């Protein structure tokens, strides 16, 4: 099948505007990575000093764990830093070590968005679903079942050789990379006398809140978006996010997903600027834009 139709930036922006939107910063991406880890660190300190705030820390940290993935996603497009070596090194060491595996997968998603060859099509295809089904999915996320299925089960399956050889190898590498990385983190915190901080304010958010916000993000981005869309303005969705949603659900402008699909050369921190320019010209009226995440979930699970 042919690649999905693309948007021409010249139809929406002047050359100066496009240059401003696509100019890559030598410091902004690095600052965002530092910001993400800083928020995680401060939330851990908050939970350590005032244990009653641990539930809030779980929400904050789980959202910033998603934030690290979002920044790695920008790096997959070469947007985190203008020097590709720095871009990739920062992403691998401070966001996610899976950059090399993720990049070709994700670029295929952009090339064939909402078409049969889109590797992410399975995330949006089941919708709409019943409200009861959505509740069950969210409960599995919050109870750690999704985490176990995605992180633990593949490693066990690969260890007992129940999958093809190449898949076994990939799953073993990913699984042991995860196990070793977290074992080292636990060891460092345990040596400092704070082993419980790693368990309650790193692994617990990863096993509960992170799967939930990742699912909601996936639903918001492409669920109920039509297959084989000829109009680039309808190939993905942008969801307006208030301050609370940005803090606990959609960090680092991930909610401007349609703008990202339209203009993949624009770094995440400039997506709001691109949206504002489109809005000034009346283009957003033709785009798939929803007023909030609750509105999207109501459409995805209407009854």
Image: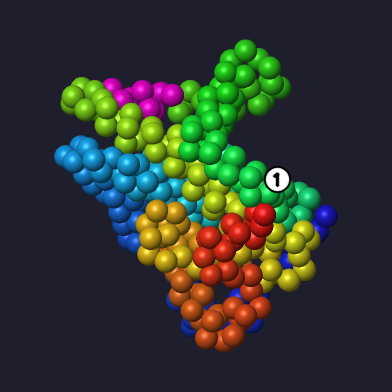
The answer, for residue 108, to whether it is visible in the render is no
Image quadrant where one finds the N terminus: bottom right
Q: Residue at x 48, y 38 (%)?
A: 142
The way the protein has been coloured in the rendering is rainbow
Q: Position of residue 10 (x, y in %)?
A: 61, 80
Q: Position of residue 166 (x, y in %)?
A: 67, 25
Magenta segment's dominant SS is helix
Q: Which residue is mark 1?
A: 122
For label 1, the crowd category at 10 Å Cα-Cα, with few meaning under 14, some 14 to 19 and many 20 or more, is few
Q: Position of residue 254 (x, y in %)?
A: 49, 59
Is residue 182 a member of the stretch shown in magenta? yes
Q: Is residue 21 above or below residue 260?
A: below
Q: Is residue 103 or residue 230 the one in the foreground?
A: 230
The answer, for residue 178, to whether it is visible in the render is yes
Residue 144 falls left or right of residue 109: left
Please tell me in which quadrant of the rendered image residue 228 appears: bottom right
Q: Secondary structure at mark 1?
A: helix
Q: Residue at x 31, y 46 (%)?
A: 56
Q: Is residue 228 above or below residue 142?
A: below
Please tell me in which quadrant of the rendered image residue 239 appears: bottom right
Q: Is residue 154 above or below residue 268?
A: above
Q: Is residue 64 or residue 223 the one in the foreground?
A: 223
Image quadrant where one finds the C terminus: bottom right
Q: Residue at x 39, y 38 (%)?
A: 205
Image: magenta residue range = 179-188
Q: Is residue 50 above or below residue 219?
A: above
Q: Is residue 255 or residue 135 the one in the foreground?
A: 135
Q: Position of residue 226 (x, y in %)?
A: 75, 61
Q: Residue at x 64, y 74 (%)?
A: 287
């Amino acid at each position: 099948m042919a690649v999905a139709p693309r948007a021409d930036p010249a139809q929406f922006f002047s050359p100066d505007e496009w240059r401003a939107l696509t100019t890559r910063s030598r410091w902004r991406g690095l600052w965002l990575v530092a910001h993400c880890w800083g928020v995680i660190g401060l939330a851990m300190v908050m939970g350590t000093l005032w244990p009653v705030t641990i539930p809030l820390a779980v929400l904050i940290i789980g959202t910033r764990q998603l934030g690290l993935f979002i920044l790695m996603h920008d790096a997959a497009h070469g947007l985190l830093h203008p020097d590709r070596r720095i871009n990739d090194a920062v992403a691998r060491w401070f966001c996610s070590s899976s950059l090399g595996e993720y990049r070709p997968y994700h670029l295929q998603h952009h090339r064939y968005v909402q078409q049969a060859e889109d590797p992410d099509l399975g995330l949006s295809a089941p919708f709409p679903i019943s409200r009861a089904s959505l509740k069950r999915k969210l409960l599995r996320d919050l109870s750690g079942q999704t985490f176990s299925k995605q992180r633990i089960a593949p490693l066990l399956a690969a260890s007992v050789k129940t999958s093809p050889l190449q898949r076994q190898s990939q799953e073993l590498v990913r699984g042991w990379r995860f196990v070793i990385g977290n074992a080292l983190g636990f060891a460092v915190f345990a040596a400092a006398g704070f082993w419980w901080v790693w368990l309650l304010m790193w692994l617990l958010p990863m096993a509960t809140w992170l799967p939930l916000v990742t699912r909601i993000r996936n639903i918001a981005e492409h669920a109920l978006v039509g297959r084989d869309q000829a109009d680039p303005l309808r190939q993905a969705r942008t969801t307006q996010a208030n301050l609370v949603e940005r803090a606990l659900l959609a960090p680092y402008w991930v909610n401007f997903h349609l703008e990202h699909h339209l203009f993949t050369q624009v770094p995440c921190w400039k997506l709001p600027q691109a949206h504002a320019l489109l809005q000034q010209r009346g283009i957003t009226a033709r785009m798939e834009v929803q007023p909030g995440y609750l509105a999207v979930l109501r459409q995805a699970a209407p009854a």
